[in-house]
Image: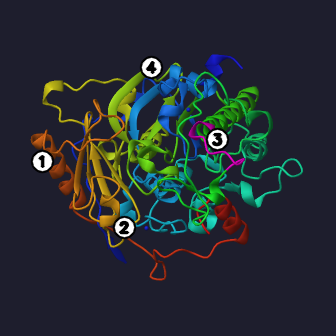
Amino acid sequence: MNQRSLCLRTLRLRASLVVGMALTVLSLNACSKSRLPEPPNILLITVDTLRADHLSSYGYPRATSPVIDALAAEGVRFENASVQWPKTGPSFASIFTATYPKDNGVVRRVGIPMPQGFRMLAEELQSLGYETHAVVSNGAVGSEFGFGQGFETYLESWKSPPPTPNADTTAAATVNALANDIIEGLDGEKPYFLWVHYVDPHAPYTPPGEWSDRFQGDPWYAPEPRIEINHDRPQMQMTGIGSARVLDDRDELGFYIARYDAEISYADHHIGLLLETLDAKGLLDNTLTAFTSDHGESLGEHHYYFDHGRFGFQTCVRVPFIVHLPGTIPPGVDSEPVELIHLTPTLLEAAGANLDDGVWMQGRSLAPRLWHVAPESPESEPPSYAFTEAGYGENRHWLKIVRDQRFKLTNAKVPSDQRWIGGAGVPWILYDLDNDPGELENVVKQFPREFHRLRRQLRDWWDAPAFEVEIDEDEGFEPREMDEKTREQLKALGYLQ
């Protein structure tokens, strides 16, 4: 395949207005008169647990991602994309409804059902004449939790027989086998929306076969530091790892990072095969491909090993985000902060939806940024902000985070969170991402003006007006009963004990 063919919830809920966004209002429908003569096919590729900074196109020295890099080279690569919650269920709930977790209620734990009163991306695309299909490989987005809304086909790899005996039913090869069955049924009479979600490189990092040792001992492999292993707490993730999380009796951090990178490479390879299959059937023509992840992964930073969701550090919040439509969307790099809640309205406008000022729910179409449309008065534009929630705090006392181009402010109300972030009794932590990308130093005292500005933005976002969403009275935000295969798969991924 040539490089060009690689070319993209009665209950009142508190709901934020879109705050402080540096986007010029522009309807993609207006753009479509000259650029999108017909609704494009939409291919959404997502890779679970994928840090942006472990992709070659985002500056990583290892060659982990040639296929993804090709998409990035021909599309718009968002350099500073933030998820709205670094956990699979809450993140995808936010993406597909274009609402913040604090407002849609899908927070903290696996198994929280998606409120049916919320319209989701696939439902909206169906109403626009699209056929809608999905293959997913993480039980956190299982159909029993409502994520299949609007999909004609919703295939869950862990509930399907493996393509070969003893194969991992969640691995990328199984995902592709299922996706190929869907692709065979696409006839081109209607535009399609296809969502393919790969679980690799989610822990445990066990890439198959030849992929396993791909980066072991290469020039970027570091045998030090070593990881403390705790045999009394098998699932430990802080300051070291529990015995149940040990692979091959190894304690070198570099070993686990190389395994994580190998899983990225394995997924990247199969993304290439997926694109080849679509191309061979002529189904990549006029196809907008969007690529992103639900969250990243902490690989020992801040004493947090091989997990995500507990904190809001960049390792788990910053993800790759690429939008690709060759010949239509000019390639480029967008370095301003961006939130993934803007993905769905962007795709809806591309599909021909008539959105008021490009806004759908709490998201806003990224069309102006995709077409590099400059504001009439750039100097009068406020900075872009991105909001994220994270952690395990209850009663809405979880972590609240806002960032702009340079600074990032975290509000930690719970002492158990403060301990690991700014220290006991420190509820506000400000990081200078330009000079401290590892988020190691609290600079609240050094930058009081920036601290108070970001604190106001965070307050305005959290306290914004509410809107009503109709919910079945029997529906709640408690974990839902799940299929036994889903339970088994979520145990294997470490979500359940």
Q: Position of residue 160 (x, y in %)?
A: 79, 57
Q: Nearer the viewer, mark 3 or mark 4?
A: 4
- Earlier along the polypeptide chain: callout 2 or callout 3? 3
- Is residue 68 among the parts visible in the rendering? yes
The quadrant where residue 260 appears:
top right
Q: Nearer the viewer, mark 4 or mark 2?
A: 2
Q: Position of residue 182 (x, y in %)?
A: 74, 45
The residue tagged 2 is 393
Mark 4 residue type:
Pro
> How far is mark 1 from mark 2, CA to CA?
24 Å
Check contact, mark 2 vs mark 3: CB within 8 A.
Answer: no
> How far is mark 1 from mark 4, CA to CA?
37 Å
The residue tagged 3 is 190
- Earlier along the polypeptide chain: callout 1 or callout 3? 3
Point out which mark residue 452 bears.
1
Mark 2 residue type:
Gly
Residue in the image at 32% along x and 53% along y: 421
- Is residue 75 among the parts visible in the rendering? no
Q: Residues within 10 Å of mark 2 (few under 14, many from 20)?
A: some
Query: What residue span does the magenta drawing correspond to?
Result: 247-255
Residue 431 to residue 496: above or below: above
Disc 4 is placed on an element classified as loop
The quarter of the picture where the C terminus appears is bottom right
Check contact, mark 1 vs mark 2: CB within 8 A.
Answer: no
- Earlier along the polypeptide chain: callout 4 or callout 2? 4
> How far is mark 4 from mark 2, CA to CA?
42 Å
- Secondary structure mostly seen in magenta is loop
Q: Residues within 10 Å of mark 3 (few under 14, many from 20)?
A: few
> How far is mark 2 from mark 3, CA to CA?
45 Å
Mark 3 residue type:
Lys
